[in-house]
Amino acid sequence: MITIALSKGRIFEETTPLLAAAGITPAEDPDSSRKLIIGTNREDVRLLIVRATDVPTYVQNGGADMGIAGKDVLVEHGGEGLYQPLDLNIAKCKMMVAVRDDFDYTGAARRGARLKVATKYVKIAREHFAEKGMHVDLIKLYGSMELAPLVGLADAIVDLVSTGGTLRANHLVAVEEIMPISSRLVVNQASLKLKRPQIQPIIDAFAAVVAEGK
Ligand code: ATP
Ligand code: MG
C-alpha cells in the first residue's frame, strides 16, 4: 500500500492532474467528504487528508509514504529525513514582507529601528531579518496576519502573497520578497527503499507533467 499525504483546497486541486497522470483517481472529493483517508481507483494507493503544515511530519515518521507540501511549510519544518525529488511547480506564490501603506519600511530599516513582525513563519522571518542585520521582535500568529499592522500589534508581517488582493483590501503593501514558493513532492526515505517499484513510477509520472508545463 502507498499512502500519500495531501492537504485540502488549493494543493489538492492542483494535485489532481498529477495524480491522474500516475493513473490515480480519488474515490471522493476531500472538500465535501468528512473522511480523512480517501481510497482511489488503485487498490494499492490511498490518500491521507491532513493539515498543510502536518504533511512533513506524517511523511517523516512514515505515517505516509509520500506527500505534497509547500516550500514555506518545508523550510519552516526543516525537512529533516525527507527526500525531496521534485518541485511540482504548483501552488505558486511568494513569501513577502508587507507593511501598512503609510509605513516607511525603507526608512525604518535605514534608521536601524527595531520592528515588530507578526507571522506564522517564525523561522523564515528570523533568518531573513538576521541576514539583513535588522533587529526584530517576532510575534507568532496562526492566521490572518494582515490584521496585525492594522491594530498596532506589528509594524510588518511575513506572509504568502499571490495576487496581492488581500494586502490591498487591508491597506497593506509588499515591500520585500523573501523567496518564491511552490509545492514539492516529499518521500519517506525508508519507503523509497522498500517500495521503490511502486513509488518510482509515481515520481516519474509527476515529473513528466511538470516537464510538460515548463
Ligand atoms: P488555512 O488557510 O485554512 O489556515 P493553510 O494556510 O494551512 O490553511 P492553505 O491556505 O490551503 O493552508 O495553504 C496551503 C499551501 O498552499 C501553503 O503551505 C502554500 O504553500 C500554498 N499557498 C498558500 N497561500 C497561497 C496563495 N495565495 N497562492 C498560492 N499558493 C498558496
Ligand atoms: Mg492559508
Image: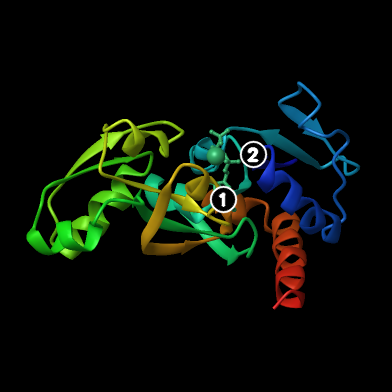
Q: Residue at x 73, y 64 (%)?
A: 206
Relative image position of residue 67 (x, y in whole percent): 62, 47
Amino acid at circle 2: Ser
Would you call the spot at circle 1 few (<14 residues within 10 Å), some (14-19), or many (20 or more)?
A: few
**Which one is in front, 25 or 153?**
153
The residue carrying mark 2 has its beta carbon less than 8 Å from ligand 1: yes
Q: Residue at x 50, y 43 (%)?
A: 56
Tell me the quadrant of ligand 1.
top right
Amino acid at circle 1: Gly
Gap between marks 1 and 2 measured at Cα:
23 Å
| Residue annotated with mark 2 | 7
Relative image position of residue 126 (x, y in whole percent): 24, 50
Residue occupying the far top of the picture:
34
3 lies left or right of 25: left
Look at the picture and state if 212 lies above or below 3. below
Relative image position of residue 145 (x, y in whole percent): 41, 37
Q: Quadrant of residue 7?
A: top right
**In this orientation, does residue 14 appear?**
yes
Q: Secondary structure at mark 1?
A: helix
Q: How many marks?
A: 2
Which quadrant holds the N terminus? top right
Residue occupying the far front of the picture:
102
The residue carrying mark 1 has its beta carbon less than 8 Å from ligand 1: no
Residue 15's disc is none
110 lies left or right of 66: left
Return the disc, 1 or 2, that comes first in the chain's sequence. 2
Residue occupying the far right of the picture:
41
43 lies left or right of 92: right
Relative image position of residue 79 (x, y in whole percent): 42, 51
| Residue annotated with mark 1 | 165
